[in-house]
Image: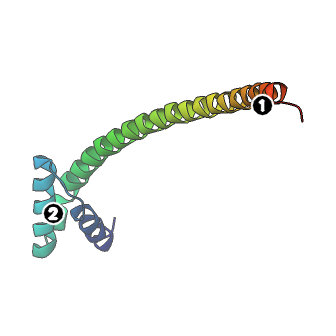
Amino acid sequence: MSDEALAALVARVGAFHITDRAMKQAQTRMEEALRDGRIDAEREAYLRAVRSYFTGFEREARTHLRDVDRRLEQINQVHFNLSAERGVAVKRIEATQGVLAEIERIEAPTA
């Protein structure tokens, strides 16, 4: 990895809100190493820290995504079921209105 690519990675990682103490320390050390020109001394440790942190971060995000997808499937099933129930209710109203209208016609006085 070139020094420019490493510097770009450090900037990209630095844009994240990092709460993990070990990752914050690795980030700070690498930023200082870039300023001081001691990149080689920190490169491997930094890359390990970034890999470790972002592997866990990705795993957590994928778990969250699976949960959201599962919940969306449940919501879609509920939506489908409610739409079907609504259709049945509408047909029941139409059928009962037809019966009630017929009663009105039968009871209406003939002219």
What's the residue at 20%, 57% (across, down)? Answer: 17
Q: Is residue 58 left or right of residue 91?
A: left
Choose top left, top right, bottom left or bottom right for residue 89.
top right
Whole-percent x, y for residue 93 in the image = 69, 30
Q: Which mark, residue 101?
A: 1
Q: Are there few (<14), some (14-19), or many (20+) residues within 10 Å of tag 2?
A: many
Sequence-wise first label, 2 or 1: 2
Image-quadrant location for residue 12: bottom left
Query: Of helix, strand and loop, which one carries label 2?
Result: helix
Give the residue type at disc 2.
Met
Task: Sort mark 1 into few (<14), some (14-19) or many (20+) by Cα contacts within 10 Å.
Answer: few
| Residue placed most toward the observer, 33 or 92 | 92
List x then y, in percent, for residue 52. 26, 44
Residue at (21%, 49%) from the top-left corner?
A: 49
Q: Is residue 69 placed above or below 107 in the rendered structure?
A: below
Left or right: 94, with 60 as reference point: right
> Split into 4 quadrants, where in the image is the N terminus?
bottom left
Which of the 4 image quadrants contains residue 77?
top right
Tell me: residue 24, above or below residue 108: below
Q: Secondary structure at mark 1?
A: helix
For the residue pair 50 and 90, the one nearer the viewer reads as 90
Name which residue type carries label 1. Ala
Between residue 7 and residue 54, name the one nearer to us. 54
- In the rendered view, does 5 fall on the left or right side of 33? right
Residue at figure coordinates x 9%, y 74% from the top left: 36
Q: Residue 64: percent from the left, percent from the top?
A: 37, 39
Q: Which residue is mark 2?
A: 30
